[in-house]
Amino acid sequence: MHKFKVQLYITFFLLLLLVACNHNSRQIKYIIEQAKSCMDEYPDSALLLLQDIAFPQILRGKERADYALLYTQACDKNYMTPVNDSLIRIAVDYYGASKSMDASLSYFYLGCVNWNKGSNVEAIYAFLKSLDVFPSHSENRLFMQIHIYLGECYNWEGLYQDAKEHYFLAYQEALHRNDTLDMYYPLCGLGTSYLYLNLNDSALFFLNKALNIALSCRNIDMEKSVLSNLLGYYEVNHEYGKVYQYANRLIELGDDDLGNIYRAKGNVLIDMGLLDSAYYYLKLSVASNNLDTRTMGYYSLYKLLKKKQDIGLTEYVDSFILYKDSLNMADRYDEIQKLKSEHTEQARQQEYLQYRSRLKLYVLAFCLFSVLIAIIVFLIIEKRRKQYYMILQQKLADSKLDSIKKYMKEQFDETVELETKLKELEVEEVKGCVRSFERTVWYKKIANLSDQYLSAKEQRELFKDLSVLFAGLIETLRGEYPDIKEIDIYFCILSVIGYKLKIIAACLRTTDRNLSTRKSRMKKVLSQNIFDVIFVNS
């Protein structure tokens, strides 16, 4: 009798739960539709609507997938980076097998999440998959956005030819849509890709077209963006008149932080011999709130006072080292904050698991069946995803290998006269740079590397610091070897410091065998004297 009463209470409870869920389901559908309708124009309102949904973890089916997609989309449009890709994968798992706009959007935002995390290969896979499931003959701005992001990813991986092709497809789509504003971003991307390919005429052509669009639209933000790219190009190529012109224009337009512009103008004035004026602008640059800008500003002040043989030289060297260390501290702080965010997310997931366990008594049979089906579907999708991922990795590897072969062929066909430049290599200054590097956290960290590669993020941070400390050596190498690759430059710097091939291979994310081959090739290109200076310790 007691058992019968218990069963009766359970049945009654389930009926009440079913009625409540049915009512709540209609309300959730209404919220989702409202969020979808205002997503493009009012993403902040869409995010607030979605945040009003209580216990989104219990949503199922299409509602769960729509919530995951819309919430990720709202976060992206409100410049909020998700901690991980667990949420958007719910939408990918639900829509991914179909050829629909929802499926394409799901893979697109999966790519955006991975791109923001620095997982470039996973991002490329997601964006390519987004193209695969994009509905045929559909006209949507998403098609252009996918190609723009693929261009960004390929540029970051050094696959500039592939990047150029995707930017061009995005540009063609913008032309088809006759949207002048949308033309701006692929034009900027095309200009950047051509710069990396050393096709300067084409680069300037597309960057100037982007500038014309910004000027015609009277969009100050767009004008400042493209002018900054042009400024960087002319600064690297020592076209001081253009640097001076664009720096003055950027100062005129104003910004929250003009420190980098002041630094560029100061460097130009140094080269023009106007040292007092240069000092004025460089002092303005070190007042920047940006640690990168402030660090580079102090380094420029150091070079200026060195040229003037000023007694204040030591002060700016110390300031440069101080702010460089501050940059490292800021990076460590960001890592700690990221770990805290991940811990919070894990706590939320644990709470959700506990909540599900309390309901397990009433829906055990249904859950077991659902879990079984979900596991089968997940394994099928995961198998296909891994296969596609392996194909993509192979494609990236083949593309990089082709680029290396092309570079090596070009280098073997060229003869470079460097004997006259040997006198310009300031050996003592290089040694001083090495001593400065030995005082950084990088020195011991790299020396203690075994078989573990630096992460992509760590590699970028290392390259940034090396570019600052060894700016003189880099300038000399680039001046005499205009076609030298970035990887060869950093190989030279790490060799000057005294690291062995195995350690350098871990920093450059390659093999010591590959570096041995690269070293043999460089011996044929470099003069004997300069080769001995660089590789004296290796």
Image (spheres, grey):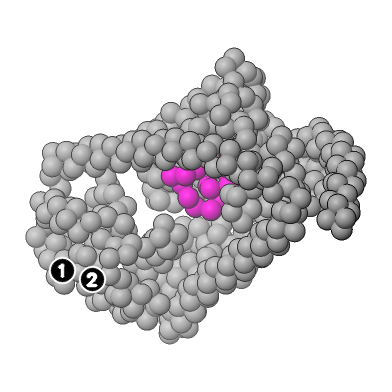
User: Mark 1 sits on what residue?
Assistant: 538
Instruction: Determine whether the residue tagged by mark 1 lies in a helix, strand or loop.
Output: loop
Q: Is residue 473 above or below residue 324?
A: above
Question: Residue 257's image quarter?
Answer: bottom right
Residue 413 falls left or right of residue 253:
left
Please tell me how crowded label 1 is: few (under 14), some (14-19), or many (20+) other residues with Cα within 10 Å: few
Chain part drawn in magenta = 109-125
Amino acid at pointer 1: Ser
Task: Please give left or right for residue 422 compared with residue 215 in the image.
Answer: left
Q: Residues within 10 Å of mark 2 (few under 14, many from 20)?
A: some
Disc 1, disc 2: CB below 8 Å?
A: yes
Residue at image coords 27%, 55%? 510
The kind of residue on which mark 2 rests is Tyr
Query: Disc 1 versus disc 2: distance between alpha carbons?
Result: 7 Å
Q: Which mark is residue 109?
A: none
Horizontal and vertical percent position of residue 296: 48, 66
Which residue is label 2 attached to?
Answer: 499
The structure residue drawn at horizontal position 88% and vertical position 43%, both measured from the top left corner, is 15
- Up the image or down, 50 lies above or below 402; here it is below
Query: Which is more toward the observer, 448 or 266?
Result: 448
Dot 1 or dot 2, earlier in sequence: 2
